[in-house]
Image: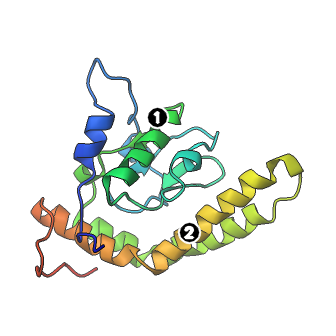
Amino acid sequence: MDLPAYWDPLPTAHALAPSGREAPLVFGGRWAERNWRNVPGPFYGADTDCMELGRMEAPRHVAYDGEHEFVYRQPVDAEETRALVWAAQVETYSGYGRDGDEHWTPQAVRDWWRDRGRVREWAVAAGAEWAAYDADPRFFPHYHEAAVGHRDFVAHIDHGLEPYLRGYLFWLEQRRAPRGGEALPRL
């Protein structure tokens, strides 16, 4: 199945976790506190707790930096969006945000992509550190699963993130998904 160049996950996220005075706060993360490792897109981890529960709900989207959770892959369909919303719901500080579209600019996305080597290098090193954990056997599964997340992040940077970001650039510039045959912006 061919995925569209960009799919807007926010209508699904708003249906699953409405905002407003009567709704429980799920997406309370603030842009100014976002983790620099988050890939560009509408969702991000900011001042999240350190309980590291997000990968249990959204292993294809959430990774850890040792203190906080961040979004390493944006959702591209309703099921992936559900998983990310569930990860945000189990996060006790409501530290995930979903207002990235209001803050990312085409130039900021291009800057993040240009600097992806720094993010990739960090993910390789962090994954090796998590995989090497051997202090307490009770925690082996958790640390080794976290290492899997970092390896997935590196693989996503190497294969798949570029076309997503080109579609996201189109979305930011046009506020609509590209139609078949339309040229996508360059990174």
- On the picture, is 157 further left or further right than 181? right
Note whether residue 42 is visible.
Answer: no
Front residue of this view, candidates 142 and 129: 142
- Distance from disc 2 to disc 1, alpha carbons, whole Å, reads 23 Å
Note whether residue 86 is visible.
Answer: yes
Local packing at callout 1 (Cα closer than 10 Å; few below 14, some 14-19, many 20+) is many
Q: Could you tell me residue 2's position as x and y percent?
A: 28, 74
Front residue of this view, candidates 138 and 19: 138
- On the picture, is 126 further left or further right than 79? right
In the drawing, what numbered circle is on residue 152? 2
Please name the residue shown 73% across and 70% down the image.
128
Q: Could you tell me residue 62's position as x and y percent?
A: 52, 54
Q: Amino acid at mark 1?
A: Gln
Counting residues from the start of the chain, the first of labels 2 and 1 encountered is 1
Q: Amino acid at mark 2?
A: Asp
Residue 65, picture quadrant: bottom right
Please name the residue shown 27% across and 44% down the image.
12
Please name the residue shown 73% across and 60% down the image.
144
Q: Could you tell me residue 64's position as x and y percent?
A: 60, 53
Q: Which residue is mark 1?
A: 89
